[in-house]
Structures are given as C-alpha cells and as structure tokens.
Amino acid sequence: MDVKTAVAGTLESSDVMVSYSPSDSDLEIVVESIVVKQRGRLIKSVLEEITSNRGVSKGILTVQDRGALECTLRARVETALDRAGLTL
C-alpha cells in the first residue's frame, strides 16, 4: 500500500486537526496548540508514543490543537496515520 497525505479532525474548539505527509526525511512533528503551555509535553509524549508504536520514522506529522482531550488527540492521530496507509 502506498503512503499518502492524510488528514483527520477539525479546527473546531475542543478538537484537533492532524495531518501526515510522507517524506524521505526523518519524522518531523509540528505542534500548534492554544494550550501548549499547559499540555505541550503531554501532546508531544502522545505523538511520540503513537508514532514509535507504529514504526513511523519518516514524514511530517502536523498537529493543530484547539484544546482537545487526550482521547480525541489519540483518535485523530491514529485515524490520520490509518488514512495515510501507515496501518499496523
């Protein structure tokens, strides 16, 4: 299966938009969040956990957070990676 660009989520309040773009470069994680001071470390930790568990080591993962709960963040990241063709 080919890996492709994919998006999950919205920019609505209390949601998060996650996009993945394939790249030959090492994985780059970009986080924009309205609550980065309060939850920035948690967000990065969740992203690193999921990408590590899935073996994602290349590409660009962009997260635009609008105050989403951790369970929502996890679901959006998993969905974006599934849609990109990075299934377990």
Image: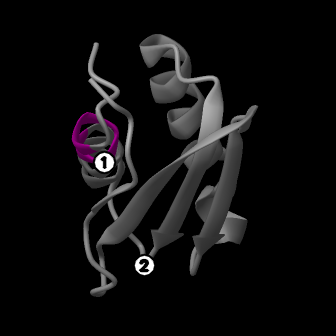
Observer-side mark, 1 or 2, equals 1
Q: Residue furthest bottom?
A: 12
Q: Is residue 64 above or below residue 24?
A: below
- First to last magenta residue range: 79-83
**How far apart, in angstroms, are the residues tagged by discs 1 and 2?**
17 Å
Asked if residue 82 lies in the magenta stretch, the reply is yes
Q: Earlier in the sequence, mark 1 or mark 2?
A: 2
Picture coordinates of residue 87 (x, y %)?
27, 21
User: Number of labelled discs?
Assistant: 2
Which residue is located at x 64 percent, y 62 percent?
31
Q: Secondary structure at mark 1?
A: helix
List the single residue furthest toward the right: 25
In this orientation, which residue lies closer to the viewer: 1 or 41? 1
Instruction: Name the foreground residue: 84 vs 39.
Output: 84
Q: Amino acid at mark 2?
A: Arg
Quarter residue 18 falls in:
bottom left
Question: What secondary structure is found at the residue carrying circle 2?
Answer: loop
Q: Which mark identifies residue 22? A: none
Instruction: Tell me whether the residue at label 1 lies in contact with that at label 2, contact meaning CB atoms closer than 8 angstroms.
Output: no
Q: Is residue 66 above or below residue 38?
A: below
Quadrant (top left/top right/bottom left/bottom right) for the N terminus: top left
The kind of secondary structure the magenta stretch mainly shows is helix
Query: Percent x, y for residue 74?
Result: 33, 41
Tell me which amino acid carries mark 1. Answer: Ala
Give percent across and percent down for residue 50: 45, 26
* Image side of residue 23 versus residue 69, left or right: right
**Is residue 47 a member of the stretch shown in magenta?**
no
48 shown above or below 69: above
Left of 82 or right of it: where is 68?
Answer: right
Q: Which mark is residue 80?
A: 1
| Mark 2 lies on residue | 66
